[in-house]
């Protein structure tokens, strides 16, 4: 289902918890230009989390789960387009704000 159809269906009315901070908030901003995109990729919390860790391990990028989700979606689009095509994505967050979470400093860990 396209984002536009999803919005029109009323499915975004009910809010639900999402591990991706601020994603899945259950609203569509009035300023959203639905003509500015062709498709929407659904990315699970687990996929976004793993991609975020991969960006840290393999690329040295300290990003949050929103950026992990952007990577997952970009890789899907790149595979669909095939060899020789380019895909641009923006990593919309930093991992700095998550230093206060148990992911980085679990209880009992030495700093």
Image (cartoon, rainbow, N blue to C red):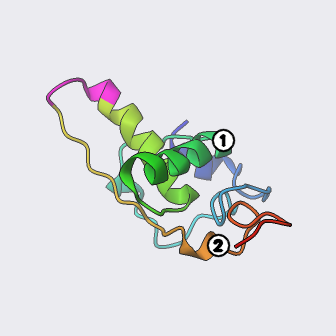
Above or below residue 45? Residue 78 is above
The part of the chain drawn in magenta is 79-84
Local crowd size for mark 1, using a 10 Å CA cut-off: few (<14), some (14–19), many (≥20) = some
Q: Which residue is mark 2?
A: 99
Mark 2 or mark 1: name the one nearer the start of the chain. Answer: 1
Above or below residue 107? Residue 59 is above
Above or below residue 66? Residue 5 is above
Q: Is residue 59 visible?
A: yes
Q: Which residue is mark 1?
A: 46
Q: For this view, does 75 lie left or right of residue 2?
A: left
Residue under the point 79% across and 63% down: 106
Q: For this view, does 76 lie left or right of residue 44?
A: left
Q: For this view, does 36 lie left or right of residue 28?
A: left
Residue under the point 65% across and 57% down: 20
Q: For this view, does 47 lie left or right of residue 32?
A: right
Local crowd size for mark 2, using a 10 Å CA cut-off: few (<14), some (14–19), many (≥20) = few
* Percent x, y of residue 89: 33, 53
Q: Secondary structure at mark 2?
A: loop
Q: Quadrant of residue 29?
A: bottom right
Q: Residue furthest right?
A: 108
Single out the mark in the foreground, 2 or 1.
Answer: 2
Q: Nearer the viewer, residue 73 or 8?
A: 73
Residue 6 marker: none
* Percent x, y of residue 35: 35, 55
Residue under the point 49% across and 62% down: 63
Q: In which quadrant of the rendered image does the N terminus lie? A: top right
Q: In which quadrant of the rendered image does the C terminus lie? A: bottom right
Q: Secondary structure at mark 1?
A: helix
Q: Residue furthest front?
A: 110
Mark 2 and mark 1: span between their CA atoms? 19 Å
* Percent x, y of residue 22: 65, 66
């Amino acid at each position: 289902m396209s984002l536009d159809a999803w919005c029109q269906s009323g499915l975004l009315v009910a809010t639900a918890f999402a591990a991706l901070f601020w994603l899945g908030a259950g609203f569509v901003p009035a300023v959203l230009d639905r003509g500015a995109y062709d498709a929407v990729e659904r990315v699970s919390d687990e996929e976004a989390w793993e991609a975020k860790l991969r960006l840290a391990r393999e690329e040295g990028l300290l990003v949050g789960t929103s950026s992990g989700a952007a990577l997952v979606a970009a890789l899907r689009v790149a595979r669909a387009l095939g060899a020789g095509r380019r895909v641009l994505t923006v990593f919309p967050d930093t991992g700095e704000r998550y230093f206060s979470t148990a992911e980085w400093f679990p209880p009992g860990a030495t700093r």
